[in-house]
Amino acid sequence: MNNAAGVSGLMIESTAAGTGSLISSTASVPATVQRYIDGSSAWHLVSSPVGSATAETFLGHYLQFFTESSADWTDIVSPSTTLAPAQGYSLWSDTETYTFEGNLNSGNISIATSQA
């Protein structure tokens, strides 16, 4: 895939009707990706579909990360905190659509875990 139009050239939408997806083996594909969350003030598990997302995407909502070794959830308070690809986060949100812009995550992405 070659997207010469940047993040505005490829839009993967998400609405109450469904969420779009894309399977690509090409690295560095710029895109805008939406994630619709349907909830009535509840916790949702989220992850970033792009490599450059920050916590600012979820500004005004509670976002947490989990530390496996201590089994603790920690609030992310700085909007400039980078969201690591493949890392799961817990988001307290009601119904809203969140937008990510950047290069899509691609290839094999792994994170270290201590539990088998």
Image (cartoon, rainbow, N blue to C red):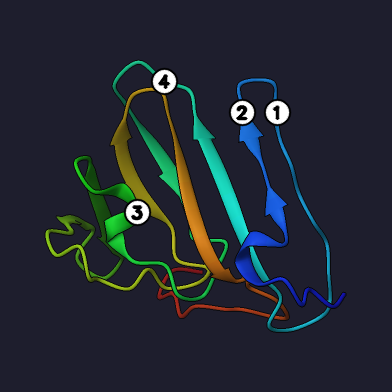
Q: Looking at the image, tell me whether mark 1 or mark 3 is earlier in sequence order.
A: 1
Is residue 10 visible to the viewer in this orientation of the structure?
yes
Badge number at residue 101: none
Amino acid type of the residue tagged 4 in the rendering: Gly
Amino acid type of the residue tagged 1 in the rendering: Gly
Q: Looking at the image, tell me whether mark 3 or mark 2 is earlier in sequence order.
A: 2
Amino acid type of the residue tagged 3 in the rendering: Thr
The single residue placed furthest to the front in the displayed view is 5
- Label 2: which secondary element: strand
- Label 1: which secondary element: strand
Mark 3 to mark 2 CA distance (whole Å): 17 Å
Mark 2 to mark 1 CA distance (whole Å): 5 Å
Foreground residue among 48 and 44: 48
Mark 1 to mark 3 CA distance (whole Å): 20 Å
Q: Looking at the image, tell me whether mark 4 or mark 3 is earlier in sequence order.
A: 4
In this figure, which residue is indicated by the disc labeled 3?
57
Q: Looking at the image, which residue is at 40% across and 75% down?
A: 114
The single residue placed furthest to the top in the displayed view is 40
In this figure, which residue is indicated by the disc labeled 4?
39
Badge number at residue 15: 2
Is residue 97 toward the left or the right of residue 9 in the image?
left
Q: Give the percent coordinates (x, y) of residue 81.
A: 24, 71
- Residue 88 sits in which quadrant? bottom left
Is residue 104 visible to the viewer in this orientation of the structure?
no
- Residue 28 sits in which quadrant? bottom right
